Image: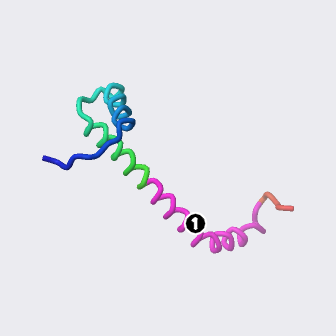
């Protein structure tokens, strides 16, 4: 048997409402769905942090490379 949770009445009502909306029969199914969504969101946040970090690392060199090609561009910056 699993570990029981102490859930407040207000939260219990929310879970029961979600059970009906989602068409599931057990509270644990609602909680598992919620955990899955939270895990996906946490992974998305981690990816964004990695992308921002990588962008910071390459920003200077990217700027320098683009600056080298600017004199040959057909569009002249003013």
- Residue 37, horizontal then vertical, whole percent: 38, 45
For the residue pair 75 and 11, the one nearer the viewer reads as 11
Indicate left or right for 45 with 68 as reference: left
Q: In the image shown, does 62 or 51 lie closer to the viewer? A: 51
In this rendering, would 44 be left or right of 55? left
Q: Is residue 5 above or below residue 77?
A: above
Q: Position of residue 65 (x, y in %)?
A: 66, 72
Magenta-highlighted residues = 44-73
Q: Position of residue 36 (x, y in %)?
A: 34, 46
Residue 68, above or below 15: below
Q: Is residue 58 magenta?
A: yes
Q: Residue furthest left?
A: 1
Majority SS type along the magenta span = helix
| Type of colouring | rainbow
Instruction: Determine the residue positioned at 42% across, 54% down.
Output: 42
Residue at 82% over, 61% down = 76
Q: How many marks?
A: 1
Give the residue number, with chain letter if any, for mark 1: 55
- Relative height, residue 7 to residue 76 (above, below): above
Locate residue 2, reporting x and y percent. 17, 48
Residue 41 vs residue 57, the one in the foreground: 41
Residue 18 sits in quarter: top left
Q: Which residue appears at 36% of the width and 28% of the height? A: 17
Query: Mark 1 packing: few (<14 Cα in 10 Å), some, or many (20+)?
Result: few
């Amino acid at each position: 048997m699993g570990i029981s949770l102490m859930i407040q009445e207000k939260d219990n009502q929310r879970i029961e409402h979600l059970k009906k909306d989602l068409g599931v029969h057990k509270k644990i199914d609602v909680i598992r769905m919620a955990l899955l969504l939270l895990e996906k969101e946490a992974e998305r946040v981690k990816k964004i942090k990695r992308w921002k970090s990588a962008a910071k690392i390459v920003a200077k060199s990217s700027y320098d490379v683009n600056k080298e090609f600017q004199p040959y561009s057909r569009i002249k910056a003013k």
